[in-house]
Image: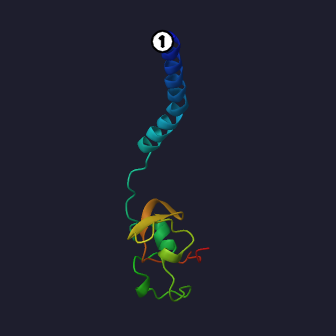
């Protein structure tokens, strides 16, 4: 009878290990694949110039500027709330200022 209990225990451990291994491997690979921090978008960048990007929306004097608009409330800005800089889908290799603005601004949905 002792032999049966050991076998059941072994099978239980083996099944639990087999079931959780893919989850553990996926979590480990996600951590390893985490992107490095992106650099800030330089004002000298060609795309930034073309879209009249500025890090300070309060100083914008552009015909397309709407009062109260900034990267924080733009649909393209993907930064976390309260974050000073964050990713933008228009500038995938850089981060933009949350208080910034560009002429491609579109109200966040």
The residue depicted at 44 percent of the width and 82 percent of the height is 57
- Give whichever of 53, 71 is nearer the camera: 71
Across and down, in percent, residue 90 comes to: 53, 65
Task: Name the residue beneath numbered marker 1.
Answer: 2
Q: Is residue 35 above or below residue 45?
A: above
Q: Determine crowd level at label 1: few under 14, some 14-19, many 20+ residues with C-alpha closer than 10 A.
A: few
The residue depicted at 38 percent of the width and 55 percent of the height is 37
Secondary element under disc 1, as helix, strand or loop, is helix
Asked which colour scheme the image uses, the reply is rainbow
In this image, 59 relative to 74: left or right? left
Residue 39's quadrant in the figure? bottom left
Q: Is residue 46 above or below residue 11?
A: below
Across and down, in percent, residue 24 comes to: 47, 36
The residue depicted at 47 percent of the width and 88 percent of the height is 61
Across and down, in percent, residue 98 comes to: 43, 73
Q: Is residue 13 above or below residue 49?
A: above
Question: Which residue is outermost to the right?
Answer: 109
In the rendered image, is residue 102 in sight?
no
The residue depicted at 58 percent of the width and 74 percent of the height is 108
Across and down, in percent, residue 62 comes to: 50, 86
Q: Is residue 71 above or below residue 23?
A: below
Number of numbered markers: 1
Q: Looking at the figure, which quarter contains the C terminus? A: bottom right
- Give whichever of 2, 59 is nearer the camera: 2
In the rendered image, is residue 56 in sight?
yes
- Give whichever of 18, 25 is nearer the camera: 18
């Amino acid at each position: 009878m002792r032999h049966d209990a050991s076998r059941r225990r072994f099978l239980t451990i083996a099944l639990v290990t087999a079931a959780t291994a893919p989850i553990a491997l996926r979590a480990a690979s996600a951590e390893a694949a985490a992107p490095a921090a992106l650099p800030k978008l330089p004002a000298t960048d060609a795309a930034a110039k073309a879209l009249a990007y500025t890090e300070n929306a309060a100083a914008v004097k552009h015909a397309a500027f709407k009062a109260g608009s900034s990267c924080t409330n733009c649909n393209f800005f993907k930064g976390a709330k309260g974050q000073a800089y964050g990713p933008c889908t228009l500038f995938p290799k850089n981060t933009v200022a949350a208080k910034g603005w560009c002429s491609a601004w579109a109200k966040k949905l």
